[in-house]
Image (cartoon, helix red, strand yellow):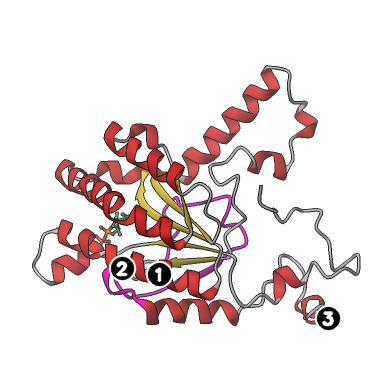
Amino acid sequence: MFARKGAGDHGILMGTSTQKDVSCDAVPQHVAVIMDGNGRWARRRILPRQVGHRAGIKPIRQIVEQCMCRGVKFLTLFAFSSENWQRPREEIRRLMVLFVEALNSEVEELYEKGVQLSFIGETGLLNPALQELMKAAEIRTHNNSRMNLAVAVAYGGRADLVNAAKKVARQVSEGTLDPEQIDETHYASALEMARLPDVDLLIRTGGEQRISNFLLWNLAYTELYFSDVLWPDFGVDEMKKALDFYVGRQRRFGRTGEQIEGARC
Ligand code: FPP
């Protein structure tokens, strides 16, 4: 459905203009966000952690608005990781309640704004009522095309890679795929993000500088932006800083700076 930049996309070598897509774009096509720092935000105010998670809803609204305004086409948010199942049961329960509330209160507005909503991760592990709401939200917004908002819930990058390997292995064992046909494009089509282009910009808030098992395959050439600001305080101005950081990056994808300069738009 969406164009993926493949290994064979050698625009610069072939004298075409496709290189423009990888070096000169001021606006990232796909932004992913690790929304970290809700717990510390609450602790600093001597409040329970769930208050921090609840305060994390407002910046989501602001970031969605800002991305739409700047022309970002894909936004992916890391809401709950495979590893987050290890958190205290009560925190998980309250987070799930928050997801249900957020879906109930936000989906209609996202629909009105032209946002297509999708979910990635092992969503089958979630409460059935939440799964139903997710499915309904996907169906409701299916025909929207202004921006795609993907929410990663119960998502783990390694599990995603393993599940994709299983899918491809099944195709081979069923005789529908010759192992020689397996290339990066085919493998990527078995991943959770198959329908989405690679991530251009990853933002992590909360001061930590790590990937935490988020989109491992899809972050191979992503520009990384780390902010010390805790997620509940990450508003429009902070998002502008992140997008401005991206503008200043030279994306080389293995090529030299001179090659990129030569092809500059
Ligand atoms: C990480 O901060 C945050 C989470 C595990 C939950 C993220 C959830 C939200 C922002 C709100 C709801 C989201 C949606 C999509 C409806 P942390 O708890 O690890 O913070 P800490 O590092 O300060 O402890």
Label 3: how many Cα within 10 Å (few below 14, some 14–19, many 20+): few
Label 2: how many Cα within 10 Å (few below 14, some 14–19, many 20+): many
Work out whether mark 1 precedes mark 3 in sequence or the reverse, and give the earlier one. Answer: 1
Nearest the eye: 221 or 97: 97
Q: Is residue 66 left or right of residue 29?
A: left
At mark 2, the secondary structure is helix
Name which residue type carries label 3: Gly
Dot 2 and dot 3 residues touching (CB under 8 Å):
no
Instruction: Tell me the magenta residue range.
Output: 209-235
Work out whether mark 2 precedes mark 1 in sequence or the reverse, and give the earlier one. Answer: 1
Would residue 120 be seen by someone viewing this image from the given angle? no
Can you tell me which quadrant of the image ligand 1 is in? bottom left
Q: Is mark 2 within 8 Å of ligand 1?
A: yes
- Per the image, the residue denoted by label 1 is 63
Would residue 55 be seen by someone viewing this image from the given angle? yes
Name which residue type carries label 2: Trp
At mark 1, the secondary structure is helix
User: Looking at this rendering, what residue extends furthest in the left direction?
Assistant: 46
Q: Judge whether 81 appears above or below 159 on screen.
A: below
Residue 262 is tagged as 3
| Residue 195, x across and y down, in percent | 60, 47
- Per the image, the residue denoted by label 2 is 231
